[in-house]
């Protein structure tokens, strides 16, 4: 905290004298420490100046743009002056300015530019998610198109022909906003929803691996994308997901002209209003099959898995922004003769929210590291990622909703006013428990991961090592872990196991996040010691007695 800000707080000045953070990267002690710890020296040297830049943009520039893009959402222009179908989607200028900031942050360039990719191969996801996290603290709609773009690049890189890679990937890692191609995943249909095997859009084969697609996609986020991946049926409906293949769709035909897709309407969404979600009917839409016929769902899972991780990072970023908004407000707001944060019930709430946020932060970034290691051939981490990513997706989304709601309440009536960021954060976060598979789907995915991978074994080993490291203080948690494993071995057969598994996985998540606090502790992380003390006390004793100093330590934010 700067000297001038400290004087403002000590003198209990009016809001006009209050100066919040001017750089989200420099203010966030927790994130900055984590990245410096896990980035290689080369990545630290390359990326830190860019993190400072996007941290400044997020703190000083992006709020006004984000609020404008949210207030004036995209509009569908179905026809031109001559009555011809054009289905163009028009955006407020703020949307394109926000897109330009994303490009200049290098969140994609650091992952996909050939030279940078080679240099940072072992930490590409860490490198890309760091600027994305800071960006998402200020804007909630564009993180979806950005997520889809990285996911599309992953599919192109892994499964497309060399010609497609050479043609499309440079538009992902470009440093020129006008040249950016964004991605989309057209998956959901009326008939299926989460039950993808019930999808009905049909693909009719043509020449040279090209097909014509017909049918309706019900929820197409980032509907204006230049790179679209879609699932369509090449087998009988009775085959379920085994009858689906993956297709690459581009809005422009190879010889010029518009690829026929009818945008029925744009979705009028509760939140994330700055970006376009649409209902789209395919009418002989030209598409190129990617991979083998019938393996579409398996290939698309690569994009879905990465998207779930993006969902977790967005949840973490939204929660962080809400928490620090409320914290900064409480540090200057004078009420009943003292600062708001000095009231016991207030600082007790910030201790709780700070501890909850830390669990969200550390499980998310542990999952990112697991995916980096998995992509580089670490089999053990690949098994862990299989279980951890759906776990992190579900947990972070639910916790973020709670943290934002409680942070809004801490600000009182001003937190409810649309001039500020809190209402938009509240609206935007509510989609995160739904996107990329709702919470119940994550439970089913964790069940499959526990049965078909060694992810649970790897996680338990990691947790056991951490708890033993803590000694006697962690003995209750070792006992809880043993009891949990016994119950998992005795899961009932049939549908009932889903109900039991939900509660078991929730307990497993709590224990795992607690073990991460132990693993990350050091002399340079006083917030972790405070969080461990709070969580340990809350889980083993009936009453915790925090102090205002605990609140400051747990939030770990300078401004």
Image: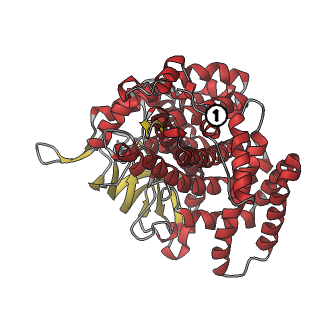
Residue 412 in the image: state x and y as whole percent. Answer: 39, 46
Residue visible at 45% across and 66% down? Answer: 193
- Residue sticking out furthest to the front: 337
Q: State the image coordinates of residue 422 (x, y, percent, origin top left).
A: 40, 44
531 or 361: nearer the viewer: 531
Report whether 248 appears left or right of 264: right
SS type, badge 1: helix
Q: Nearer the viewer, residue 75 or 355?
A: 355
* Residue placed most toward the observer, 370 or 272: 272
What residue is at 82 percent from the left and 59 percent from the top?
A: 476
Q: Which residue is mark 1?
A: 30
Tag 1: Cα neighbours inside 10 Å, few (<14), some, or many (≥20)? many
Vertical placement of 346 versus 114: above or below?
Answer: below
Specify whether residue 87 is in view: no
Q: How many marks?
A: 1
Task: Judge whether residue 107 can be spotted in this image.
Answer: yes
Colour convention = secondary structure
Judge by depth and name the residue closer to the eye, 237 or 509: 509
Image quarter (top left, top right, bottom left or bottom right) of the N terminus: top right
Q: Residue 502 in the image: x percent, y percent?
A: 64, 69
Question: Where residue 256 sits in the image (x, y, percent)?
Answer: 32, 39
């Amino acid at each position: 905290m700067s000297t001038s800000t400290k004087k403002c707080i000590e003198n209990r000045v009016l809001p006009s004298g209050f100066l919040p953070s001017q750089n989200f990267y420099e203010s966030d002690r927790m994130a900055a420490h984590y990245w410096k710890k896990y980035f290689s020296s080369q990545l630290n040297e390359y990326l830190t100046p860019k993190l400072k830049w996007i941290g400044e943009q997020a703190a000083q520039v992006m709020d006004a743009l984000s609020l404008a893009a949210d207030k004036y959402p995209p509009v569908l222009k179905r026809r031109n002056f001559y009555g011809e179908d054009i289905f163009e989607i028009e955006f407020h200028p703020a949307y394109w300015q926000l897109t330009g900031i994303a490009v200049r942050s290098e969140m994609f360039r650091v992952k996909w530019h050939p030279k940078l990719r080679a240099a940072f191969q072992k930490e590409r996801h860490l490198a890309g998610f760091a600027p994305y996290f800071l960006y998402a603290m200020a804007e909630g709609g564009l993180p979806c198109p950005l997520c889809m773009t990285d996911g599309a690049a992953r599919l192109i890189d892994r499964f497309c022909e060399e010609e497609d890679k050479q043609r499309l990937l440079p538009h992902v890692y470009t440093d020129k906003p006008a040249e950016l191609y964004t991605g989309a995943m057209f998956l959901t249909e009326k008939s299926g929803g989460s039950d993808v095997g019930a999808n009905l859009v049909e693909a009719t084969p043509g020449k040279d691996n090209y097909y014509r697609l017909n049918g309706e996609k019900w929820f197409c986020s980032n509907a204006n994308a230049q790179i679209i991946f879609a699932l369509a049926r090449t087998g009988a409906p009775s085959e379920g997901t085994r009858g689906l293949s993956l297709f690459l769709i581009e809005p422009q035909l190879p010889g010029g002209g518009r690829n026929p897709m009818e945008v029925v309407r744009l979705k009028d969404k509760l939140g994330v209003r700055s970006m376009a979600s649409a209902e789209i009917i395919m009418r002989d839409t030209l598409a190129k099959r990617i991979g083998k016929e019938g393996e579409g769902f398996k290939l698309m899972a690569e994009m879905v898995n990465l998207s779930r991780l993006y969902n977790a990072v967005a949840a973490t970023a939204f929660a962080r922004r809400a928490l620090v908004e409320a914290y900064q407000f409480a540090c200057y707001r004078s009420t009943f003769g003292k600062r708001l944060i000095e009231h016991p019930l207030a600082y007790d709430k910030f201790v709780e929210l700070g501890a909850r946020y830390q669990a969200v932060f550390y499980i998310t970034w542990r999952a990112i590291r697991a995916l980096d290691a998995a992509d580089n051939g670490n089999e053990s981490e690949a098994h862990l990622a299989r279980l951890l990513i759906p776990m992190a997706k579900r947990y972070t989304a639910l916790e973020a909703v709670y943290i934002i709601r409680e942070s809004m309440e801490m600000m009182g009536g001003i937190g409810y006013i649309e001039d500020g960021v809190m209402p938009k954060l509240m609206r935007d976060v509510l989609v995160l428990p739904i996107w990329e598979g709702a919470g119940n789907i994550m439970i089913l995915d964790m069940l499959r991961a526990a049965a078909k991978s060694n992810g649970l074994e790897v996680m338990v080993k990691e947790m056991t090592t951490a708890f033993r490291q803590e000694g006697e203080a962690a003995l209750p948690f070792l006992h809880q872990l043993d009891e949990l494993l016994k119950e998992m071995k005795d899961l009932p057969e049939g549908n009932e196991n889903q109900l039991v598994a939900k509660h078991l996985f929730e307990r497993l998540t709590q224990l795992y996040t607690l073990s991460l606090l132990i693993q990350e502790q050091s002399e340079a992380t006083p917030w972790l010691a405070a969080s461990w003390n709070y969580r340990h006390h809350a889980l083993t004793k009936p009453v915790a007695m925090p102090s205002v100093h605990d609140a400051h330590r747990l939030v770990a934010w300078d401004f």
